[in-house]
Amino acid sequence: MKLQWLEPQSDDEPITGADLTAVGVLAERLELSPDAFQPALDELKTERGYVEQDIVELSPETPDLEALCAKFVDEHLHTDDEVRYVLEGEGIFDLRSEDDRWMRVTVEPGDLLVVPANLHHRFSLTSRKHIRCVRLFKDSSGWVPHYRDASEANG
Ligand SMILES: [Fe+2]
């Protein structure tokens, strides 16, 4: 997992776990073997009430890849947590910081990221255009993007 301010200012400290927890983001590394990550995901399900688990994959072979990606590239939030454990590939989450700046989180295999409900964010693929990850949900109904009004965003 790589962390960087999207528009760095000269006096910026590097992004730390504290910057992520300040907005309720959970970021962890789990070993990639199913024997290792599944018990950790099961624990997370019990702790946080996630009941559904599936696997999603985006790749250059995905039909309508551009249309799918376009749904998540603009700033939005969900009323459910967005839980992703990366199995293959990589992806870019931009998350709003406590002071409403962009924190760029580039996720790689073995990274677990929980974007909490109601935190504004956006997602895009890297130039490799491939990610495969486990998703956890409380229920599928909360997982609809609600776009941020451009007039209230910092860009
Ligand atoms: Fe999202």
Image (cartoon, rainbow, N blue to C red):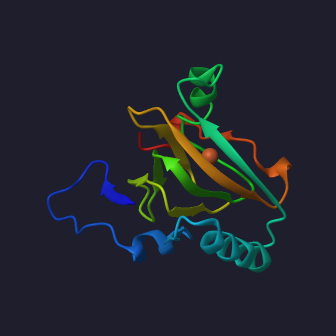
Picture residue at 56% right of the left edge, 51% below the top: 120
Q: Position of residue 42 (x, y in %)?
A: 74, 74
Q: Is residue 151 above or below residue 119?
A: above
Q: Is residue 39 left or right of residue 138?
A: left
Of residue 143 and residue 62, the one placed in the foreground of this image is 62
Q: Is residue 99 left or right of residue 120?
A: left
Of residue 150 and residue 93, the one placed in the foreground of this image is 93
Among all residues in the image, which is located at the extreme left? Answer: 10
Q: Position of residue 1 (x, y in %)?
A: 39, 60
Of residue 33 and residue 101, the one placed in the foreground of this image is 33
Q: Quadrant of residue 62?
A: top right
Q: Quadrant of the C terminus?
A: top left
Q: Quadrant of residue 37?
A: bottom right
Q: Quadrant of residue 56?
A: top right
Q: Position of residue 83 (x, y in %)?
A: 65, 59
Of residue 152 and residue 117, the one placed in the foreground of this image is 117
